[in-house]
Image (tube, rainbow, N blue to C red):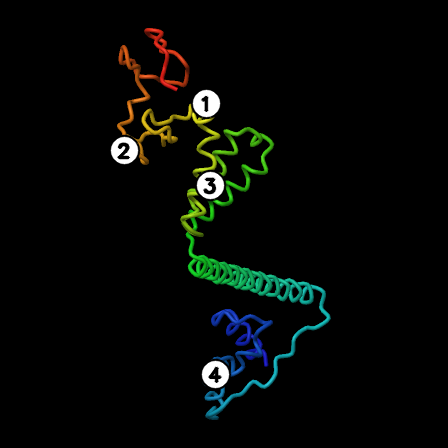
Amino acid sequence: MTRVKTYIAQTFKEDNINIFEVDEHLNDFSSAMKEHLIPDFADYGVGLERFLVTRIVKPDGDVQYEKFKDIHFRQYADIAEAKIRQQVGVIDQQTEAQKLVIESQGIAKKRQIEGYTYQQERGFNVAENLAQNEGAGSFSSAGIGLGMMAGVGGAVGSNVGEMFNNAFNGLNNPAVENRVDLYCEECGSKLIPGMAFCDECGHPVPNQNSCRKCGYVFERPGKFCPKCGTKREA
């Protein structure tokens, strides 16, 4: 029995067996103990064919043993809990990533069905923000915001975009408000600005953007030429 106790201690040390986990290694422990005992049995002329350890009695209740047992299991419990938290965190991240992919695919499909792109959608958002901004009360700001919106009007119909562009071009161009209506010298029909001939009688239309006397090119509306004083054509 003295040698058996010594062999038990040697086996624990040589095979690095944890006393708190020895029950999981009883077969290995039995084999190691058998190798130690074969010579001792041979001294008595007895051959040791098998040697099985069925139970290891632990010093339950011992203060030091209980202390180390608590530390051991707490250590493994903390490690297991940390691994579980890590795995749960990975699963949550994968779930959020997959959710984001699914939502993005859904939004992209919606844009494709409704006929607009991400850039056009951003244009609508900017126009909406400008319209809600207090500083958008001026004609200039309103023209910018709605002009951007009109720029993406092609997604919902080119006619809508053209309507917005035409409606607000005048707001941003003061010259349009002060434009003088022109009439044909031959038949008196109202002329369209920029046309070379009257669309009613075909009479040539003089260049209304320059002085008929000195040739000065007018830069803004007025009744007289700012260079020579000649009265401009009405």
Instruction: Tell me the number on the disc at residue 164.
Output: 3
**Pointer 3 or 4: first along the chain:** 4
**Pointer 2 or 3: first along the chain:** 3
Quote the CA–CA distance across marks 2 and 3: 33 Å
Q: Secondary structure at mark 1?
A: loop
Q: Secondary structure at mark 4?
A: helix
Report the mark closest to the observer, 3 or 1: 1
Residue named by callout 2: 202
Quote the CA–CA distance across marks 3 and 1: 21 Å
> In the rendered structure, which amino acid carries the disc numbered 3?
Phe
Report the mark closest to the observer, 3 or 4: 3
Quote the CA–CA distance across marks 2 and 4: 120 Å
Residue named by callout 1: 178
Instruction: Tell me the number on the disc at residue 31.
Output: 4
Residue appearing at x 71%, y 68% in the figure: 62
Q: Secondary structure at mark 3?
A: helix
**Pointer 1 or 2: first along the chain:** 1
- Which residue is at the far front? 187
> In the rendered structure, which amino acid carries the disc numbered 2?
Gly
